Amino acid sequence: MSNIEKTSPLIRSAIFELLNCAPLPHTVDILERTLEITDVLSDDFASLMEDLLSSPFWQLADYSGNPYKVMCLGLAKEIDRLARQSKEPAYHSRQHFKDVCLVISYFISQDRYSLFQQSSSNWWAISLEEKWLLLLAAIAHDLCHSGQVNRTPFEIEKNSLDVLGKYLSQKNINPDLMNLVMSRVGPWILGTDPAIYGQLLTRVSGEQVNHEDCLSMLLVESDLFASALPIKGRVLGARLAKEWRRGYIAGANRIDSVEGRLAFLHHIRFISPYAIAVGAEEIRLSSIKTLTDLKFRD
């Protein structure tokens, strides 16, 4: 990557290629390259968000009176401001936020291709407003993350929601709109607590599935996808191990091993029609095979 100039046009080009109009999933190489470019070359979160929202997909998703675009851009700027005040965690940093925002955009862009039925009877169907709310949730889901692990259920996720609520209050958001935002994104962000992943997967896979759980799972899948990639996933595993070494040594040592990465990949699933459309589950299984082969060679 050292031979690539740090230019905004290169970042925009990578984002536009990711969110292009071709109805076929991108290769793993393109996904890896896009996330590497935006990881290494973008200086701040707000600039990345401006490039993302200028992409054809988000331009088409915009609508008259849309209040969420300003929220997304403003919150990205606030995250940059907060990041300048103290050192960011090794993993739960703006780099991670960028990955999740790019991935959730890539996932939900698949509904343009009629790869699955978008109807009122489909729990996975996403409205135009919900697309923007999901992007806002992706921006906010690890807001002011401490770099530690939860000591009580939803501890870190609740803190992120508290920070989001305070930020929106300071911006004099219409109270009804603010209540709508918090009531919708709140359950999705709480759903990113790793401790309840199994429960969420069971609900979404069972007969008691509902729309809110589906949208929560979509955010979780976007949170996990980069870590399932063969190259990016190893980089992110090393970052998480570094972060956890501040106070969670056992977890750090586990995640930074082939066995730990295999356990993670066996634990997760990609079940939403959006993730299935881009081949996320095949990527996960391929990463497992690569690691398993490496383990046996060693």
Image (cartoon, rainbow, N blue to C red):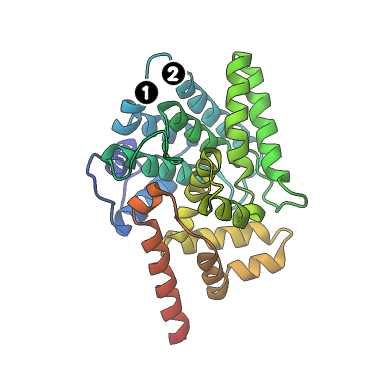
Residue position marked by numbered label 2 in the rendering: 66
Whole-percent x, y for residue 32 in the image: 36, 55
**Which residue corresponds to the image point at 67% horizontal and 50% vertical from the top-left?**
147
Q: Residues within 10 Å of mark 2 (few under 14, many from 20)?
A: few
In terms of image quadrants, where is residue 14?
top left
Left or right relative to 143: residue 207: left
Q: Distance between the Cα atoms at labels 1 and 2?
A: 7 Å
Whole-percent x, y for residue 287 in the image: 41, 68
Q: Residues within 10 Å of mark 1 (few under 14, many from 20)?
A: some
Whole-percent x, y for residue 39 in the image: 44, 48
**Which residue corresponds to the image point at 37% horizontal and 35% vertical from the top-left?**
119
Can residue 172 be seen in this snapshot? Answer: no
Figure disc tally: 2
Whole-percent x, y for residue 259 in the image: 56, 75
Label 1 is placed on what type of residue?
A: Asp
Whether residue 191 is situated above or below residue 290 in the rendered picture: above
Left or right relative to 81: residue 103: left
The N terminus sits in image quarter? bottom left
Task: Residue lying at the far left in this picture: please name it.
Answer: 22
Residue position marked by numbered label 1 in the rendering: 62
The front one of 30 and 197 is 197
Is label 1 in a helix, a strand or a loop?
A: loop
Residues at discs 1 and 2 in contact (Cβ within 8 Å): yes
**Which residue corresponds to the image point at 63% horizontal and 70% vertical from the top-left?**
254
Label 2 is placed on what type of residue?
A: Asn
Is label 2 in a helix, a strand or a loop?
A: loop
